Every structure is written in C-alpha cells, then in structure tokens.
Amino acid sequence: MYLGIDLGTSAIKAVLIDHAGKVRASASHALTVSNPQPRWSEQDPRAWWTAAQAAIEQVLTEAGRAGIAPRQVAGIGLSGQMHGATVLDKDDRVLRPAILWNDGRSDAQCRAMETWPGFRDITGNLAMPGFTAPKLLWLREHEPAVFEQIAKVLLPKDYLRLCLTGEYATDASDAAGTLWLNVAERGWSQQMLDATGLPLDAMPTVYEGNAVTGHLSQALADRWGMQRVPVAAGGGDNAAGAVGVGIVRHKQAMLSLGTSGVYFAVSDGYLARPEQAVHSFCHALPGTWHLMSVMLSAASCLDFTASLGGYADVPALLADAERAGLRNDGPVFLPYLSGERTPHNDVHASGAFTGLRADTARADLANATLEGVGLGLLDGIEAVDAAGLHADDITVIGGGSRSAYWTQMLADIIGRPLTLRAGGEVGAALGAARLAHLAAEPGATLTDVCSMPEVTAVREPNAARHAYFRERRQPKFRALYRQLAGVYRAEETV
C-alpha cells in the first residue's frame, strides 16, 4: 500500500492505494484561510500538521475496516499547494503565518525582480506576487525582524515532510515555482538567492519527485503502527495531479478545476513564454518539464456565486444553472476575484458581473460564472499553444470535473474533447501516492505505475456552440477585462 497526502488550500486529503493503483481508502480534513488585509492570504503551518495527522489517522482507520493494516503501507508521497512561503527559525519554529499562492501583496517587489540581470532567462517565468521569492522580498522590507531570523524557507508540503521525517527537502516541480530555481538545469540559482538576500543553506535539498527524501520518524511509525517507510519527494499539486491521471509524457495535457484553474501540458524539453504569464516548470519526474497556465479563481468562483445567490451549496447552483440553461444574451462574469495570472499577470484585476437586466435571475448569474471561468481557462490554453505546445485531447480533474453540465460547457468553449477518468476527483493525492510507489519500489516503471485511469466519459465539443463562444462571447469577455482593468488600477492608487 502507498499513502498519498495532498495539502490543499481548503483541505488536506489523504488516499491509500494498493500495488495495482486502486484507491482503497481516502479521507480529508478542512482548512481555513486568513485574509487579514485586502489581497492578503495566509495559513498557519501548524494547522496544516494538525490536519495532516487527522487525515492520516482517518485514512488508516478506514483502511482498517477493510482489513488493511498500517504495516502494509510501504511508502508515503506528498503534494501540496505551491509557492507558499513557510519561514522557520534555527529551531524549526514557525516565524509567522505562511503567505499563500493567492496572496497579492508583493506586486512592487515583482517589479523590482524583473530588473534583475538574467531573471527571465534563469527562472523561465514572470515575477508574480503568487510566487515565493517576492514574498521574501516583502518580508525583508516590511517585517525585517522576521526576515533576520529566517533559517529555512519551505514550501507548504515540505513543512509536512519536516514534521514527518525531520528532513529539509523539496522536489523540482514545486521548487520551480519559487523563482529561485534554474528551471532548465533543475537546481537552485545562487544568483537569484543572492538577489533576494538568502543563503543557499536556507533552501531545502532539491530531489526528483520519485526520489526518497527520508523516512517516517520512529515516533510517528510507532504511533500509527507503521514501519519507518520512505517518504518520496512528491510534487507540487498540479504536477502530482498530472502524475495521478497519467499525464507524464510529451504533449499530454490536463485541465484542473480546483480552487484555482490550471491547464497543464507536458514537454520533453524546456520551453518558456513568460511574456504571456505562462508558467514554465519542471515536472515531478526526471527529464520532463511542463507549461502551465493558471487562473487564480476557478471553482472558487462557484462558491462565491452560490453564496451571493443564496444557494445552499455549489451542487444546488449547478442544478439550477442546468435547469435554466445558458442564455445567449445573459450577463458576463469576469472571474478575477483574486487578481489573475495567465495571461494578464494583473494583481489588480477584479471580478465583475456585467450586462445585468431587470429580468436577470440568479440562475443567469450561475451560468455566467460557469461560462466566465471557462473563457478565462481558454485564454490560458491559447497562451500555452502560442509557446509551441498544443494538445488535442485534455483530461479533466479536480472537484469541478464532477459536473457533466459544466464540463460539457467547457468542451464547447475550448473546442477540444475533454476526457474524464476514474479517480479524477482525487487528483494530486493519487499522484503523490504513485510517486511514493515509484520511490519505494526502484524497479517500478512509469508504465507500471503511471497508467492513465479508465475513461469514464468524453465531452465532445458542439461545433455550433463553440462558434458562438468564439465569435460572440470571447471578444466581449476580453474587451470587458481591458475596459475595467484601468478602472481598478486607478482605484488602487487613490
């Protein structure tokens, strides 16, 4: 058995898979996010560890009901939300709440980073507030007493690794999102660290995602009735999610419908297109990279509109939207509730409903939200295409993949088939478990472990609907962003 742990933004998930890759038990534990100021987003790393322990114990209990003993677990893999700045002192004490991937406070620091010699050539990316390095520059400027005490900077999942093993380690896919990694060479850039004011020994060791980084501590092994099993490097949430659905080879692609929306396409070589805010990262497996477009608010927009419209929950919103159907003259929704990355790199972008009329109903707002997220995803996919990496078939994962209505709408918007696979909603936790399998069994191959799960459905695009979205809705969507962007930037400076 192999245990995968995924540290998400809203919850920690744990899954247990058997040697054949079948999920045998799963559990999750909720997390909360703090927003102490506008555009700030933080979590307490100690709450991650509390939640992780609860999820692990829940999954072991569930497995026990099926006759699976904890000592059958042969390896642990980790995945998690990327970019979060977890800062520790010399005694591994957390110095302040972690600054998360969707935090927008460091835009001034990003502008400074773009002036560093060789910045884009080394990192392959634009400087964006979501990444880790600008967060540390913000700390150096605004919380110097904290910055001076920093002995280690860890990414979120790697804080869990420290708690599990006592080791400071990360993987290349997660490290690529810090802006301290030379992405082409898959190692830390001393030049970027020097510019940030951090020594190399403040960084964890970088491993490939299927490598062993340490072993479960004896105390935890005894507590859970496990052996001192190896802990794999794992991957950032999107890279691990791709491993979970077998997106591991050149020109394979996936669309992740989670809190954020991600389009992920695998490359067998290093590619970059920073001018359109395309992310160029290492994959969680040796010798592979990926291009990624990211919109900061995807499925989270559904939560927003469900609350705004007085729906009991998101399933109720989806059911109402499907009953009413998408009106051709309905309102337009801009999904920029937390700013945006690809293709705008605009921390000041804001969400909006436009085109409201006296007869607009809440179901129209629901459909506009589903459509607006889809059009935002299309912008990102086209940016990746422009970098020279085009995929004709896309696998859909994440919580949003459970809605047949929404996934069909997305296929119509994007104009390509969308494939749903068994276990797609498990996502990154499954990929983390697969990486644990590869680490614990050195003879295992990608063919053995990382096959693509069974196809459960294919959403074929409707040509007429695609033409409607392309010719009528996409131009309006893009024009509204351009028109409103200047307004929101002006408000920020008042």
Image: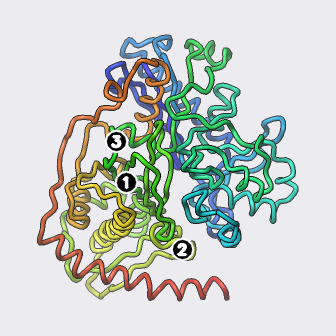
Residue 109 placement, left or right of 283: right
Residue 212, above or below 89: above
Residue 232, located in which quarter of the rendered image? top right
Residue shown at 22% from the left, 60% from the top: 411
Q: Are marks 1 and 3 in contact (CB under 8 Å)?
A: no
Mark 1 residue type: Leu
Residue shown at 72% from the left, 42% from the top: 203
Sequence-first tag of 2 and 3: 3
Q: Secondary structure at mark 2?
A: loop
Crowding at dot 2, Cα within 10 Å, few <14 / some 14-19 / many 20+, comes out as many
Residue 322, above or below 50: below
The residues bearing labels 2 and 1 have C-alpha atoms spaced at a distance of: 21 Å
Crowding at dot 3, Cα within 10 Å, few <14 / some 14-19 / many 20+, comes out as some
Report the front residue among 382 and 142. 382
The residues bearing labels 1 and 3 have C-alpha atoms spaced at a distance of: 21 Å
User: Residue 427 in the image: x percent, y percent?
Assistant: 39, 41
User: Residue 21 in the image: x percent, y percent?
Assistant: 34, 25
The residue where tag 1 is placed is 257
Q: Are marks 2 and 3 in contact (CB under 8 Å)?
A: no
Residue shown at 28% from the left, 59% from the top: 318
The residue where tag 3 is placed is 249
The residue where tag 2 is placed is 346
User: Residue 181 in the image: x percent, y percent?
Assistant: 62, 50
Sequence-first tag of 2 and 1: 1
The residues bearing labels 2 and 3 have C-alpha atoms spaced at a distance of: 31 Å
